[in-house]
Image: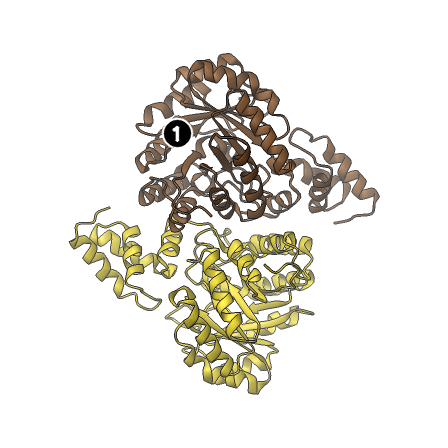
Chain colours: A brown, B yellow
Amino acid sequence: MTANTTVTVHDPTLRDGQHAVRHQLDAEQIRTYAAAVDAAGVPVVEVGHGNGLGASSLQVGRSRLSDDEMLATAREALTHSRLATLLLPGWATTADLRKAIRHGVDVVRVAAHCTEASVTERHLGAIRELGAEAQGVLLMSHMAPPGELAEQCALMVGYGAQAVCVFDSAGHYLPDDVTARITAITTAVDVPVAFHGHNNLGMAVANSVAAVQAGAHTIDACARGFGAGAGNTQLEVLVAVLERYGHRTGIDLRRLADAADLAERTLMPAPPTIDSTSLVSGLAGVFSGFKKPVLAAAESQGVHPWDIFVELGERRAIAGQEDLIPDAARSLAAQGASR
Amino acid sequence: MTANTTVTVHDPTLRDGQHAVRHQLDAEQIRTYAAAVDAAGVPVVEVGHGNGLGASSLQVGRSRLSDDEMLATAREALTHSRLATLLLPGWATTADLRKAIRHGVDVVRVAAHCTEASVTERHLGAIRELGAEAQGVLLMSHMAPPGELAEQCALMVGYGAQAVCVFDSAGHYLPDDVTARITAITTAVDVPVAFHGHNNLGMAVANSVAAVQAGAHTIDACARGFGAGAGNTQLEVLVAVLERYGHRTGIDLRRLADAADLAERTLMPAPPTIDSTSLVSGLAGVFSGFKKPVLAAAESQGVHPWDIFVELGERRAIAGQEDLIPDAARSLAAQGASR
């Protein structure tokens, strides 16, 4: 157990929170929140469409603002905090990347499913060439065991990643799961390691503390946990708890609480809570964005949505595999499962 | 660390949740929720005014229903679950107690501030004589160190308590705090030990797991965390997490999730979330019910409510000491603190 560690808090409220408002944040919302956390001393502020650079589309939702507008607005509001953004190689082109870095982005995260690090190679290389900090992200990281995650992280470091991040995208982890994975990764690579939690099992803060104690350097967290479903690790709560443990964040907690109040008033209809869909998707380790098609399939087949999520977990369904949902519902109905 | 423990889940949704709705739950709300958790196999259901038997009053709020009506309604709805209620010796008379037990209450909890176990003696004795199970509760338990808490628990066992409960009333604990206290208590007494958490620091579920691992037999939790401020440990999340750890609760989780959905629809305006008042009161170890007078004093003295909570924590203010609030605010203003 590491006490008195310095922890870098990375705030993706203005990127991951977009999922909760269909990517509709406007310039005033971005400007005022970015200025508030900048004033509180949050070291890194991540901004963008929920799915990252170039993702605004009919398929995953058009954002209110273009990438250019979002990044320029945030850049202007930040006086000390570094500006970060994220990209998924399926959406962002090298041209998107070049424009983002021209807008003053300091850190670019390149994200891939936890077993697919190889798809990050080209973008990580391009970010390094363009002079920004390159970070590699593994999504749905509970789907790979600690050793494999560590290998995938080592691949990303080989491609030029200057930090690696594991996302608990489904909110499935308990603290021991996090300890095992962060320990394996910090042993395998010598760049900073970040952890990004979701609160489906009410464990996001406890998991983040476990990550720090296992050697994580950076923790992601959003004001009031702003994000889809059960939300992310709650930023102001995380900072308070890290300080109770004797870790240093460099953040003014009273100002951060004011920024979180602002976020609650101006960014979100209501702070996230853990509903039954979030709970079962976290338990089953399934993407919580499946909620709507699962409810529809449950209705049409007369089975309980809970059972469909459990079945999708057993089938190891990942985001994009929505076609598994009606099939899972039909097979449950055939087995005689009922609401 | 104890694995594969059997944990008794105690559900005070219909008592502690009353604080969030000014004690206004009606008979239909009580009946349908009690029936739903009974069907899910929740072993103990606690019902009453938020402050317990005999507390309905102008001072702390009149409940919509009388104690008699609440207990009779719940008793009728429960087929397997035991019925519990709570009392504070300042409010409840022996006559209240006798009526409650005549209504079929199986378990009565007698609660006192963590250093004042002696006030529970008469009521614990009366409960035993009347043939119900007597449990002793220590409120605001973070204000006593582990050794003193254990001594206070031993006193209550001497008075006839057949179980002892520690309440983290301010939501101040981190898991290590809980481990130290539950360990000290289980060493000192040989009756079952219960833990009751609040979520001010986002740690209610993690703290409850720590309590079980330190030997607690019973964990309190409310549907969706229903309760004042940041709310209680979230019942359905707790049960899911305990099962992930391999502990047994005897509860049907899918049915429990349905009961929690019902609770969200029928009992509460919205599930609790952690706002800045809840956060700072948890951090400072202060009763979160101080919110309104703190905001008023902050306004009138031009100081930040955050600083008043911190000051009240340093003065070790407890519930009922509202008169400390204006004084704390004035002294901060005199020191030149500002919003």
Asked if residue B44 lies left or right of residue A70, the reply is right
Q: Residue at x 36, y 29 (%)?
A: A31
Viewer-proximal residue, B100 or A67?
A67
Q: How many marks?
A: 1
Up the image or down, B277 lies above or below B191; here it is: above
Pointer 1 indicates a residue of which chain? Answer: A
* Residue B232 appearing in the image: yes
In the structure shown, which secondary structural element does the residue marked by tag 1 occupy? Answer: helix
Residue A120 screen position, x and y as percent: 57, 21
Q: Is residue A130 above or below residue A114?
A: above
User: Which amino acid is tagged 1?
Assistant: Ile
Q: Quadrant of residue A168?
A: top right
Q: Viewer-proximal residue, A67 or B189? A: B189
Q: Residue B249: horizontal and vertical position, in percent?
A: 66, 61
Q: Which residue is mark 1?
A: A30
Residue, far top: A95
